[in-house]
Image (cartoon, helix red, strand yellow):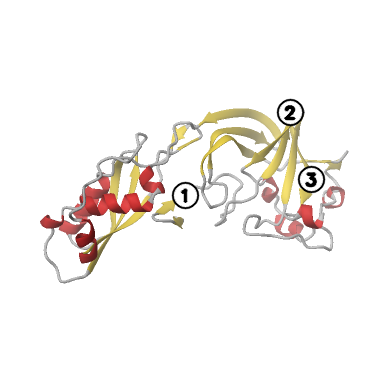
Amino acid sequence: MRHKTIILILSLLTLPFLKTFATAQIPDLLVYKGDTLSIFANPLELLPDIDSLRLRLFGNKAGCSSTACWREYQAEWLIENEQLYLIGIYSCCYYEDSLRSNLENLFPEKYFDGKVKADWVTGDILSPQGKRLYYVHMGYESLFETEVEFKFDKGILIGIKKYDNPKSKESVFSQNSQKLIEFIYSNINWSTLPKTDEKNIKVYLQFSANENGIIDSVDVMRGYSPPFDNEAIRVVKSIPEWDIYYRHGKHERRAWTLPIVFSKKNKRKYRNKAVQKMPNP
């Protein structure tokens, strides 16, 4: 399982044609019915000889790469008469170095009239559209209001499906670390916990929320003792709302890992504070 550290640790899912990158990546482009769309896919990576081809993309010149473009290129595709074509490969720094692949040299047997028939592509290509609902600093994991899925069989377009994700919602507690901390430690029943000489007791929990944003699944990843473990579970389950994720039009559970620190400092700071039952509007 991969994790991304913020105030919590979010486990993420991968998408088709995607190698795992720790930074959000520059998308390839797809021209369809006159519109140029961003796509969360890199069909060129499906070529069996992509690693050797990568060395020859720009002749004897090296393209640039960055944390947002580890593959060292951006490809442009075209759907014409239900057929997928490769029409351009550019350096990640094209507007600075003007490096562009010579497709005829790279694909002498497939090249015709400025295009390369992409008959090696079988699978789905996803185009994110509309408003970005939330940003994920990894690969192509950011979620958008609408997703259009193009289905291909050996480069032939065999279907298009549209998904709407407007039910996705971010919680104030996941987006504001201070509100989350205040809620958790103000809601701990400090008086019911056993006395201990340890200064800091940490209980690590992994949790997820249902389609209504209610945290209904909590597991102890690393506990201390039943009284502390159970209190940590109770207080996390009492968080009024959490993020709701929809991808491909379906609810998507995401697991978050959170340490609960039972310390004298937290007890003194939060024990007598007013408990915040609901987030501010």
Instruction: Please give the residue where the numbered disc 2 appears in the rendered image.
Output: 33
Q: What residue is rendered at 67% in x and 48% in y?
A: 46
The first of marks 3 and 1 along the sequence is: 1
Mark 1 or mark 2: whose residue is earlier in sequence: 1
Give left or right: position of 15 versus 84: left
* Amino acid type of the residue tagged 2 in the rendering: Lys
In this view of the protein, which residue sits in the foreground, 145 or 18?
145
Dot 1 lies on which element? Answer: loop
Would residue 126 appear left or right of 13 to someone viewing this image?
right
Q: Which mark is residue 215?
A: none
Task: Please give the label number shown on residue 88.
Answer: 3
Expressed as whole percent of the image width and height from the top left, the position of residue 8 reads: 39, 54
Q: How crowded is mark 1: few (under 14 residues within 10 Å), some or many (20 or more)?
A: some
Q: How crowded is mark 2: few (under 14 residues within 10 Å), some or many (20 or more)?
A: few
Across and down, in percent, residue 116 comes to: 80, 42
Depth check: give the residue in front, 4 or 86. Answer: 4
Instruction: Give the amino acid at mark 1.
Output: Leu
Residue 12 badge? 1
For the residues labelled 2 and 3, say whether their Cβ atoms are less than 8 Å apart: no
Confirm whether residue 122 shows in the render: no
Quarter the N terminus occupies? bottom left
